[in-house]
Structures are given as structure tokens and as C-alpha cells.
Image (cartoon, coloured by chain):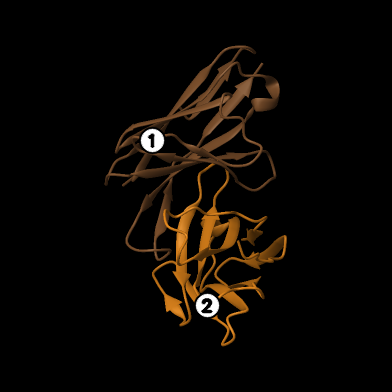
Amino acid sequence: DAKTTQPNSMESNEEEPVHLPCNHSTISGTDYIHWYRQLPSQGPEYVIHGLTSNVNNRMASLAIAEDRKSSTLILHRATLRDAAVYYCILTNLYNQGGKLIFGQGTELSVKP
Amino acid sequence: GAVVSQHPSRVICKSGTSVKIECRSLDFQATTMFWYRQFPKQSLMLMATSNEGSKATYEQGVEKDKFLINHASLTLSTLTVTSAHPEDSSFYICSVSDRISGSNEKLFFGSGTQLSVL
């Protein structure tokens, strides 16, 4: 599985935008970029995913670099409930069944 | 509402006993479920892939006789930690795939089971 690199931790102020980076320099053409987050003492939850184009949903936006070697998860207005560990994961088109391999993720703290 | 129900949320047991954790898919039939383990301040580690009607596929280093997985129906997978010891204390999480096609799919996770072995 292609590897991703994320900062261990980031801080944000409430109601400000947050940009969470992810490097994936060995990404292949058939790898999707997925983001999940895990709130304390809970299972992870899906945030967003994309292949080549930028993506938006009600939770966040995903900006993918033109060479696809990096991506950024954007939370437009951080709230205290967004404090979590955010995982950037690559999944291959041919990896049938949805197996996800988690890296260390970025622990986001949000200050009031 | 919840897509995946995991039960129990917390269990404390004595060393040497066995503990069963259930994972139910509520919204769709799941031919495949995944079991993860997470130690404090660490990331999730995939333990095994649970396949409905067939044997589970275990990741390297995970003892299949220690962690018994049964996926007898399209909505239920169980993980049994046999002869549990304190080092098995961990947060166990199941996930279910709402498969659309290839990797353009997302996983739904249970709320996790905190196992504490005394």
C-alpha cells in the first residue's frame, strides 16, 4: 500500500479554517485519497475522498495537487467538535473489499 | 442513524476467560467486515478481514486461534478473544464496507469495544 505522511499534530482556533496536509509521493494512478477522522473513544468516521479533482461535501473540502503527490483537507470553520485525529489513507482501485490501512494521522486540537 | 452497531461498548474480564464482541450491519448486507485493534495513543491496526460464509483472512502476526472470527450472516460478524490476557486489553473496532465499486467506497465503523483484562 502506498504510504502517506501527515504532521503529528496541529492546532486551530474555533471558527477559523483549518488546512490539514497529506503527502503521498508514491501514489499510483489508481489510488483514491480518503480521509477519515476519529473522535476520542469512538470509531473512525468517513470525511471525504477523491481521485484527481477537488471535492466538496457538507463536512469538508479536499484539495488535490495537480501531480497528486499531496492533498489538503480543509475544514472551513473549525468547531470544538472537530477536535479529532484525521487520517489520510490511499486505497487502490483494485483493492476490492475496502481494506484500509491507517497511518498515524494528525491530531487536531481546536481552541475556543 | 448508526449504520454499524458494535456491542458491548466496554467489557472487563478476568485473565483466562473468553470475550465475544459483536458487529452488526444495520443498513445493508455486508459480505465483508473488518476488525481493527487500537492501543492507547496509537493508530488502528487491521487484524483480519471477515468474509461471510468463509474463513476470515488474518493479517500477519495476528493469531487466528486467539482471535476467532465468525461471519455467519450478511449482517453479523463476531470476534472472540479466547483466553484473554492483560496484553489483549485494547480498543477493538469493526467496520463494514458499503461497496459501490472498487476503492470508490467508504467504510462505516462501529463505536468500538474497550476490552480490559484484569
Residue type at mark 2: give it. Answer: Gly
Q: Mark 2 packing: few (<14 Cα in 10 Å), some, or many (20+)?
A: few
- Local SS, label 2: loop
The answer to whether the residues at label 2 and label 1 have Cβ atoms under 8 Å apart is no
Report the Cα–Cα distance between label 2 and label 1.
Answer: 32 Å
Q: Name the residue under label 1.
A: B54
Of residues B20 and A8, the one nearer the viewer is B20
Residue A102 lies, in percent from the top left, at 60, 54
Q: Is residue B71 left or right of residue A60?
A: left
Report the label total.
2
In the image, farthest residue toward the front: B54
Q: Mark 2 points at which residue?
A: A29
- Local SS, label 1: loop
Name the colour assigned to chain A in the rendering.
orange
Residue B89 lies, in percent from the top left, at 64, 27
Q: In this view, does B18 lie to the left or right of B30?
A: right
The chain shown in brown is which? B
Residue A59 lies, in percent from the top left, at 44, 66
Numbered tag placed on residue A23 in the rendering = none
Q: Mark 1 packing: few (<14 Cα in 10 Å), some, or many (20+)?
A: few
In the image, farthest residue toward the bottom: A66
* Chain to which mark 1 belongs: B
Above or below B99: residue A7 = below
Above or below B26: residue A66 = below
Residue type at mark 1: give it. Answer: Ser
Identify the residue shown where x is 37% and y is 42%: B4
Q: Is residue B58 left or right of residue B103?
A: right
